[in-house]
Image (cartoon, rainbow, N blue to C red):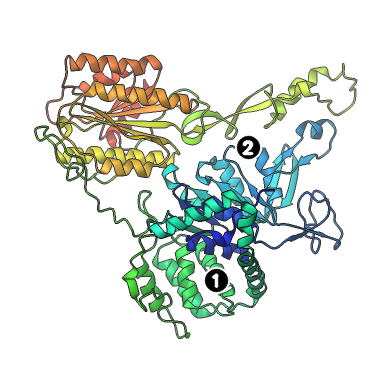
Amino acid sequence: MTIPFPFTAVVGQDDLRLALLLNAVSPAVGGVLVRGEKGTAKSTAVRALSALLPEVPVVPGCRFSCDPASPDPGCPDGPHETGGGVERPARMVELPVGASEDRLVGALDIERALSEGVKAFEPGLLADAHRGILYVDEVNLLHDHLVDLLLDAAAMGASYVEREGVSVRHAARFLLVGTMNPEEGELRPQLLDRFGLTVEVAASREPDQRVEVVRRRLAYDDDPTAFAARWAEDEAEVRARIVAARELLPSVRLGDGALRQIAATCAAFEVDGMRADIVMARTATALAAWAGRTDVLAEDVRQAALLALPHRRRRNPFDAPGLDEDKLDETLEEFGGSEDDDPDPDPGPDGPGGGGGQPDPGEGPEGGDTGARPEAGEGGQPQPSGGGEQSAVRASEPFRAKVLSVPGIGEGVAGRRSRARTEHGRTTGARRPQGALTKLHLAATVQAAAPHQRARGRSGPGLVVRRDDLRQATREGREGNLVLFVVDASGSMAARQRMSAVKGAVLSLLLDAYQRRDKVGLVTFRGTGADVALPPTSSVDAAAARLESLPTGGRTPLAAGLLRAHDVLRVERLRDPARRPLVVVVTDGRATGGPEPVALAGRAARLFAADGVASVVVDCESGPVRLGLAGQLAGELGGTAVTLDELRADSIAGLVKDVQRRAA
């Protein structure tokens, strides 16, 4: 058996360790979402926590880990008699990113249910994780329907499997821990809200601390047994403290003053609903129990807010997470009431108010990066003096963009843009199963079996169903696409007001991509060539940041931009062949620079048409005299053209054009 890295040997990451321990003390807190870059001990800390949890008494032979003191009356393996249990270590169950729905919730043998009338159920990971830890690495990359099932089970404490009238329910109470790298994409806000706490982690920038991380990791890799033995005493102390805090938890008093501070804080940060208030109350109570106290103090409320609110406060998708700690302190002071709480509950090393809220250099990105970095072209990379270089301009206010989609039906990852054959969605037909049957089409199965009943000896009521009769339901839903932006940043587009509108349009499309679970990429062209400003990624935040600092000026190498985009798609097709691309070219259609720039751009555009790549040209041409070059480019690409005004979902021109298209 693999010896986990000791929890107490993790260097730094105080917030991460505290959040995990609070959930160990009080699972009702609701789990924790750990956000951070790769290599920051996220997975190591989670795996180490399982070794600290007390052993769990279970009913012998029960696949659903029923508690012998109070067995689940509805357990599929029951009924169980009270008492007579055995103890086993608490489990940590990992949910792989590519797991199926059956692997998560369990599977019913539909063939036996129909032909034999028995309820044969194979438990899934939710049953395995009952009374333990369910760990989901890269939770932001899970399909949405799996995340919905996962969080519903976490909220209700039970898992339900229902198919064609056959229903199974079992208890599923577990500590839910998810980790994610924000650069690979975000969770939807309504799913973020279902995690009790959130923690931002980052690698330390302090050399001494980094040295200690490497030293301990090398020692563990050389001899895990000896390394674990060195930390055994510390591990035992933490394990005993968890047990003591659990016993103390029912005695902790949450006074009216603390409740008022919790309510005022949630209102001040404009969080939706009441879940934040409840989670803060449970977290503050767990903090008091962890500290060995029976009263919740203002310092507990403050720490609870820092853990429970950052992912719930109202913010735009591209805003940095975190709380305004000055605002938090003002709110707590204003609604402090008359209780004898510490007026300055979180003094820094320099005494009350020390540090002024400034983060340590080794702390995470929260507060460490104000976003005030030099813009490209203004002290970043040098540009030729004669190229008509302009500094980057800010994007105009984003708007709700009309839906751009890929025609046809795909089979890519679940999303919200283009039509696709999926495991979830509306039923559109039936087929013979290819492999395991997952979604039974009952009517088609009955139709296939009905003509053979006499030959099978059936003369009375009922139906004899054989395996060859079973039919798989085919379903249609939505998929996420790769939206590759090809943005003209040349001198023909460089008027500041005009480029601001262009950036605002692209930012609007990025917001749309964020909501529809797309991957995005960004290719820009100007001067003498084209650059991949952002390789295809699930992080629209990164795309927005690159767009904001995009400089403009110089000639218009349209062909170079298209050829570079074509290369990006060729490579991405090898990596992710099921994800269909949508190319959005943002330009006025002009092509200058190099020999025969217009003819070369046309030949480059026809490569996309030959590959059948869906494309849209956002026509940025303005002024009283228009050449219509963007429309010609759309024709060469085999796509469509829309103006900046038509790109708005609520634009009159866009509505008229849609009506005309439907009428034709």
Task: Return the x and y of residue 442 as percentages of the image width and height.
Answer: 72, 29
Q: Earlier in the sequence, mark 2 or mark 1?
A: 2
- Describe residue 594's horizontal placement relative to residue 155 as left or right: left
Q: Taking the image as drawn, is residue 155 in sight?
A: no
Q: Which residue is mark 1?
A: 287
- Disc 2 marks a residue whose amino acid type is Ser
Q: Residue at x 43, y 59 (%)?
A: 209
In this rendering, is residue 136 above or below 32?
A: above
Q: Quadrant of residue 28?
A: bottom right
Q: Nearer the viewer, residue 274 or 342?
A: 342
| Residue occupying the far left of the picture | 386
* Disc 2 element: loop
Q: Residue at x 28, y 38 (%)?
A: 505
Rendered residue at 25%/53% (across/down): 372
Q: Position of residue 21 (x, y in %)?
A: 58, 64
Which quarter of the rendered picture does the C terminus lie within? Answer: top left
Q: Is 619 displayed left or right of 9 in the figure?
A: left
Where is residue 560 shown, x and y percent of the image?
A: 25, 23
Q: How busy is the neighbourhood of tag 1: few (under 14 within 10 Å), some, or many (20 plus)?
A: many
Query: Mark on residue 100?
Result: 2
Q: CA distance from mark 2 to mark 1?
A: 37 Å
Quick one: 85 or 519, which is closer to the camera?
85
Q: Is residue 213 toward the left or the right of residue 115 in the image?
A: left
Give the amino acid type for the residue marked by disc 1 in the picture: Leu
Q: Along the line of sight, which residue is nearer the eye, 252 or 475?
A: 252
Whether residues under marks 2 and 1 lie with C-beta atoms below 8 angstroms apart, the answer is no
Q: Nearer the viewer, residue 540 or 363?
A: 363
| Residue 72 shows in this picture | yes
Q: Residues within 10 Å of mark 2 (few under 14, many from 20)?
A: some
- In terms of secondary structure, where does tag 1 sit? helix
Q: Nearer the viewer, mark 2 or mark 1?
A: 1
- The answer to whether residue 265 is above or below residue 79 is below
